[in-house]
Image: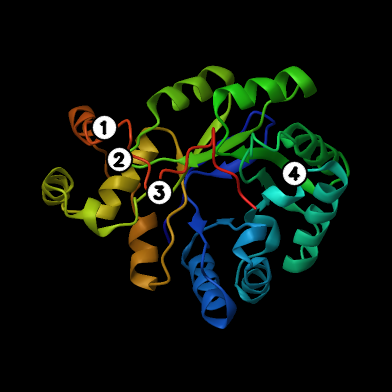
Amino acid sequence: MTQIPTTYLNDGVEIPMIGFGTARLKGFRGKDAIRNALNTGYRLLDTAYNYENEGAVGRAIKQSAVSRKDIFVTSKLPGRYHQYDQAVQAIQESLYRADLDYYDLYLIHWPNPNQDVYVEAWQALLDAKKWGLIRSVGVCNFLPEHLIRLKEETGVLPSVNQVELHPYFNQYEQRQWHEEHGVMTESWSPLALGKDLFDHPIIKDLADKYQRTSAQIILRWHYQLKTISIPRSSNPKRQLENMSIFDFELESNDIELINSLSKADGRLNNLNPAEYEEF
């Protein structure tokens, strides 16, 4: 079984360098796909309150052959519960849904700057960590200006910022900010929804060169950028392929070839954290 490398967050918590995304994996089929991912070797599961599948994740954990202590489970706070008391209740409800005693990582899903309550939400996460409900706290889709404000008002920067990141939008400046300030970058939609990117001549040529799938080339690129990726697949064969990226290395000029695909307007659905409001 492939051993997935780990790294340490700024609070000392250990996290795998590739995980399993669970968005849209629900019910019996979703639970079975998640359980198979665990039995295949994934140890990081990424869910969210708004995915409405924390129950499936929890059930998959219980039905898998893997001990809970060996699994790193992430969930996320929805935008409608940023006020402090509501955030605390939502975290508790997240745990009840999954039938877990704690989350390894809990994130604010979006900053929702127009509501401007994300600092309250962040304080709720910090307190939930003190109470033992969460081991590590982070955010999603926060721009540097949002991260700076968290630090100024609470004294604590997130351990993780999960952002849209793929070859069409490689987040160079955001990644540099994270690295300078000790925040781990995690990539959502790491494969940019697949087929169009997989068929790009640069990606196809590199797949031929390294005798790998297009997805493996892209996920290896993420790894060499020192970001954590969370690909999703319900296909057991692709689940295994996606995590089998640690026995080869992309040459530096090939990394730059992939970086050349990035565009200033490369977001898949124009979800700009400076404006987007999540319910």
How would you rate the neighbour count of disc 1 (Cα within 10 Å): few for under 14, some for 14-19, many for 20 or more? some
Q: Residue at x 60, y 44 (%)?
A: 277
The type of residue carrying mark 4 is Arg
Tell me the CA gap for discs 2 and 3: 15 Å
Q: Which label number is shown at residue 259? A: 1
The type of residue carrying mark 2 is Pro
**Mark 2: secondary structure:** loop
Which color scheme did the rendering employ for the protein? rainbow
- Answer whether labels 1 and 2 touch (C-beta < 8 Å): yes
Q: Residue at x 81, y 43 (%)?
A: 83
Tell me if I can see residue 17 in this picture: yes
Query: Mark 2 sits on what residue?
Result: 167
Tell me the CA gap for discs 4 and 3: 32 Å
How would you rate the neighbour count of disc 2 (Cα within 10 Å): few for under 14, some for 14-19, many for 20 or more? many
In x, y percent, where is residue 265? Answer: 33, 35
The type of residue carrying mark 3 is Asn
Q: Residue at x 63, y 57 (%)?
A: 48
The mark that comes first in sequence, 2 or 4, is 4
The mark that comes first in sequence, 1 or 3, is 1
Q: Is residue 189 above or below residue 274?
A: below
Query: Mark 4 sits on what residue?
Result: 135
Q: Quadrant of the N terminus?
A: bottom left
How would you rate the neighbour count of disc 4 (Cα within 10 Å): few for under 14, some for 14-19, many for 20 or more? many
Say whether residue 80 is left or right of residue 172.
Answer: right
The mark that comes first in sequence, 4 or 1, is 4
Query: Mark 3 sits on what residue?
Result: 269
How would you rate the neighbour count of disc 3 (Cα within 10 Å): few for under 14, some for 14-19, many for 20 or more? few
Residue sticking out furthest to the bottom: 28
Q: Nearer the viewer, mark 1 or mark 3?
A: 3
Q: Is residue 5 above or below residue 236?
A: above
In x, y percent, where is residue 112? Answer: 64, 39
